[in-house]
Amino acid sequence: MFFHNFKYAFKTLIKDRMLLFWTFAFPLILGTFFQMAFSNIENSETFQVIPIAIVDNDAFHNHTFLKEAFQEFGKEESKNQLFAIKYTTKEEAEKLLNKKEIDGFLWIEENPKIMVNANGINETILKYVVEEILESEKIVKNVVSFEAAKYITEQTSDEEIYKIMAEVGKNVLKMQQENNPTIKDETSANMSYTMIEFYTLIAMTCLYGGILGMVSINHHLPNMSSNGKRICISPTPKGKLIFSSVLSSYIVQLFGLALLFLYTIFVLKVDYGSHLSFLILLSFLGSLAGLSLGIFIASVFKVNENTKIGIMISITMFWCFLSGMMGITMKYIVDTKLPILNKINPANCITDGFYSLYYYTTYDRFFYNCIRLVVFSILLLFIAIIYLRRQKYDHI
Amino acid sequence: MKNCIEVKNLVKEYKNVRAVDDLTFEVHEGEILGLLGPNGSGKTTTINCILSLLKFSKGKIKIFGKNMEPNAYDIKKDIGVVFQEVAVFEELNVYDNIDYFCGLYIKDKTKRKVYIKEAINLVGLENYQKFLPKQLSGGLLRRLNIACGIAHKPKLIFLDEPTVAVDPQSRNNILDGIKKLKEDGATIVYTTHYMEEVEILCDRIIILDKGRVLASGTTDELKKLANIEEKVTIEGVEISSTILEEIKQFKNVDEILYKDNILFITYKKGKNNLSELMDFLKTKKVVYNKIFSERPTLNDVFLELTGKELRD
């Protein structure tokens, strides 16, 4: 009887077009929109190498600091490449600037000078870089002089002064390199703006699966459908029927989730990084929370099926909104102003669990979110069971 | 005769309305009992209470001699219900729908296959087994609804207006199927608004109104309850108001109605009413196309008992 009901509950769910749309197609459509919308934003924000020219004269070659810095910033195929540099004469540089083939050029006579034609970001970057190099040069020179002065007396020969200056200079440069903070991103592209949206999308899909649970319960309620009446007068215990139907809903929901993962990974080329197994675990628990929510709404609210679906979608969208679906700022605002709201928000538990995988080196916060989802699910299921057991109908 | 259902002093109240008012009746094993009543008379509410789908305020209900409760699974396994609304899954085809509902009663797959085939044959859906409900006509859908309710061969069947909105061909098929179920030994509780169906099918009839039994008995017993003896209809007649007044004064005439050249005369009792009338018309030289006399029908009894005013 259990498998008989399970088989037909499964068959009914996967043939229901409305359900297929909300649980299977809608997340895929939304994911495609996210990819189209946000990947363009990210591409537009990607740094482009700035085309510049440097007047190739003796003054430039003698200016060790500028020369070495621009050699570093101009290295092709390097991650640090900032500029595409053409070494040329001053006249040629002016021509290139007029033709807008370059954004500016560096020209050293007595002092370094920058020639630009506009006041854009690229021109500002060029000015800023040159000023920074010159400033650093000053600092290094001052530190070297100060440090070297400790070792130089009136008796120190010119040859020894040269050696001391060279040694101090080396040490200062070494110190500067060691103290220079570096940011190492171990997660590659996993926490981009688009990824945040995808994590919320997964959370939404998990919770939308609750519609499946809700429909399953409605099939067994005599006040919701004629089928419910027919099933209710059958000699099969209600608990057995409901459990098998809910199980089939959960499996259909997991199919929907698997489809979303496959679609985003293989079609939209989303990179979930090295934590995919944890993502899947959290999605399973998120789906359980969604299912419980659906069962809860179906059991507790005595309204028609369309109204119940409306309630389910509204709650889900609201929770996703609070957890940052329409902008991560909302999550931050709720976290700071009303943190309890996000603690009981299953959409936030799911997304927060995802973020925690990339922001923290331990899994404490991840498992904390997992536990919150389990508690949330158990609580809603418990209330739903109490309602279902006590339900007696005055009207059908 | 053994009772299949016993309903004693059943009361079902909604806030300020008493939908079923101290209702007592029995259904005998192997009979078809017709439950008649205008809209809102409490027929469906009574069935829902008997099936434990609704909680009721007072009373006792026994089926097969046992108290009926929501978890009385040993009673439920022998009950089949065909609801007024079609109760099938839109996503499942004809065969799967019957298999699903039959499977809630019959575990054995081989036995179930045989039962499903028999149910499909009974309602004449052999050529539609792979059709989805939305692909079926209204009549075919009603037949599927019946097949889903009776495929498990229940001993007691509730048929709640199973022929609503179906064409005459489908209706005949359904009525034949119900007779076959009775022949196979099922006890049937049948509700409908179609009097001719009740006259054809039912062994006994209960007329309900406002949740109470107004009358019960066989068709002939109920017809005797009617206050009228005979109805005479004269078609294609032109008649003056003076003559109409004279007819009204006849000894046994209860009511007359003249409309569109048709005259309806209702007699309370008496004999030779028709010949007396024809003689009178002859002396008055009134011509007509057709004249005929009828005995009261179940419909007349029903209208007399429940009143002629429109119901919600």
Image (cartoon, grey):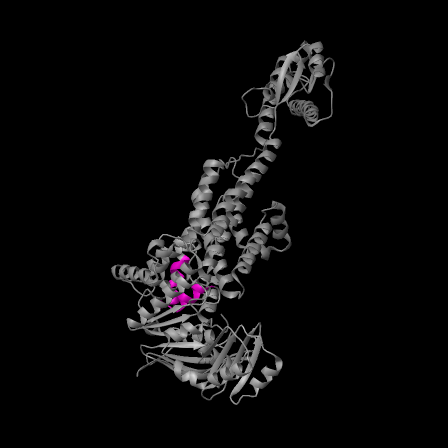
In the rendered image, which quarter is residue A71 located in? top right
**Residue A349 position within the rendered picture, expressed as x and y whole percent measured from the top left:** 52, 52
Q: Is residue B104 magenta?
A: no
**Does A322 sit left or right of B181 as displayed?**
right
Using the image, determine if residue A100 lies above or below residue A13.
Answer: above
Residue B275, position as x, y percentages in the image: 46, 84
In the image, residue A310 sits, relative to residue B27, either above or below, namely above
Image quarter of residue B169: bottom left
* Of B206 and B76, the residue lying toward us: B206
Residue sitting farthest toward the left: B110
Indicate the quadrant where residue B77 lies. bottom left
Quadrant containing the N terminus of chain A is bottom left
Q: A289 and A180: which one is in front?
A: A289
Please tell me whether residue A372 is drawn above or below residue B155 in the rendered image: above
Q: Is residue A265 visible?
A: yes
Where is residue A334? Give x, y as percent.
62, 52
Q: Give the prevailing secondary structure in the magenta stretch.
A: helix
| Magenta-drawn segment | A225-246
Does the stretch in magenta take in A236? Answer: yes
Nearest the viewer among A95 and B291 is B291
Instruction: Using the image, determine if residue A257 lies above or below residue B312.
Output: above
Say how many tags the image has. Answer: 0
Q: Position of residue B306 (x, y in %)?
A: 51, 80
Identify the residue shown where x is 71% and y is 14%: A108
Q: Does residue A292 show up?
A: no
Residue at 56 percent across and 40 percent down: it is: A34
Residue occupying image coordinates x 51% and y 61%: A297
Residue drawn at the location 53% of the way across and 42% of the way down: A31
